[in-house]
Image (cartoon, rainbow, N blue to C red):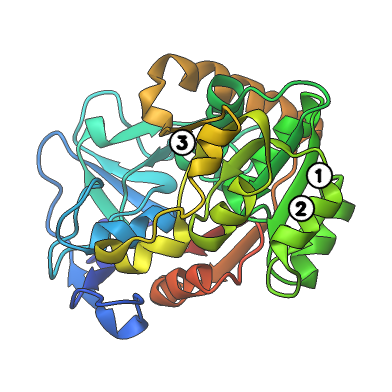
Amino acid sequence: MCYDFAMTITNTRIVLAKRPVDEATPDCFSIEREELAELPDNQVRVAVEYISVDAGTRTMLRGEGFHHQVGIGDTILAGGVGHVIGSTAEGWRKGQAVRGGLGAQTIATVTPDQIERIDDSEVPLSAYLGVLGGSTGVTAWIGIRRVAKPQPGDIFVVSAAAGAVGSIAGQIAKRDGARVIGIAGGSRKITYLIDDLGFDAAIDYKNEDVNERLRELAPNGVNVFFDNVGGPILDAVLDNLAMRARVVICGAISQYDDLDNVTGPSSYLRLAERHSTMEGFAYFHFPESIGPATAELKEWLVDGSLVLAEEVLEGIERYPEALQFMFNGGNLGKLLVKAG
């Protein structure tokens, strides 16, 4: 992507027009175009190519909460990758591939501490938001290797198994010798888990009774549960735990639309009955593991032993649609918007 700096550069950005009450529908956003001024000192200008669409974004639209918050009229916060098209900062030059909090926009003007250089010579640029992304592949690696720690022969269950984090978590658990059962919605996802990812079994929560299927597939109980969903799915697995099981809370996408009324697990007493534990985490709680995780994930990606499907919506204007698409459970693997 080339830009002539003798010409005016226009940025197209997605801004928060109003706070969602329940679902983050497209009318909560607006599309704004702005002409960019001359680049200030110690700034880097990036042509954004891919924008990550993540479940955690929904919690940023509340106005308060654990994650950074988006103000009304502000650009939606999002991770992105792209190439430098201009710089007044030492050490940064045109053409460098970068990743960082670029936001849902086509041109990002940032300070050097907001971005990092990446190498897209061996892997696609988009991989740095998927397999090699902090909130995606690195989260899955840390969740498995540092928190869940499945052992050979363990019955390992993962929810949102066909999503970006769940699909990688399941593959790593399988690599570590566990028997992997994925929970996902719809026949397309079930086929993907079994045929493409090599899971041992899969449960279609939209068309099957999760509790009943778990009793069939894991008659002696679930040893490790890696949860990305919460709600009734979490309850169903808690009801099927083995003794000394480990429950890992990575996310709770079923709850993000109404965080003021989160539905907690009604079957949590199974933890006490079965001498089991429940632990939550985020990848940034393990800063010392980010480097090793990234290195090993890249090795697997390059040799083809780890796969992650990508669904890409073309055009920055489709970002609100992409966010809604994800929360409706439509995407397979990593969901991205191609901005430029």
Contact? badges 1 and 2 (CB < 8 Å): yes
Which residue is painted at 79% across and 30% down in the image? Answer: 178
Quadrant where the C terminus lies? bottom left
Residue linked to disc 1: 218
First in sequence: mark 2 vs mark 3 = 3
Above or below: residue 31 compared with residue 118: below
As shown in the figure, which amino acid type bears the numbered disc 2? Leu
Dot 3: element: helix
As shown in the figure, which amino acid type bears the numbered disc 1? Ala
Q: In the image, 173: left or right of 220? A: left
Q: Which mark is residue 214?
A: 2
Q: Nearer the viewer, mark 1 or mark 3?
A: 1
Residue sitting farthest toward the front = 273
Residue linked to disc 3: 134
Which residue is painted at 36% across and 81% down in the image? Answer: 25
Q: For the residues marked 1 and 3, what is the alpha-carbon distance in whole angstroms?
A: 32 Å
Above or below: residue 320 compared with residue 260: below
Asked whether residue 214 is in view, the answer is yes
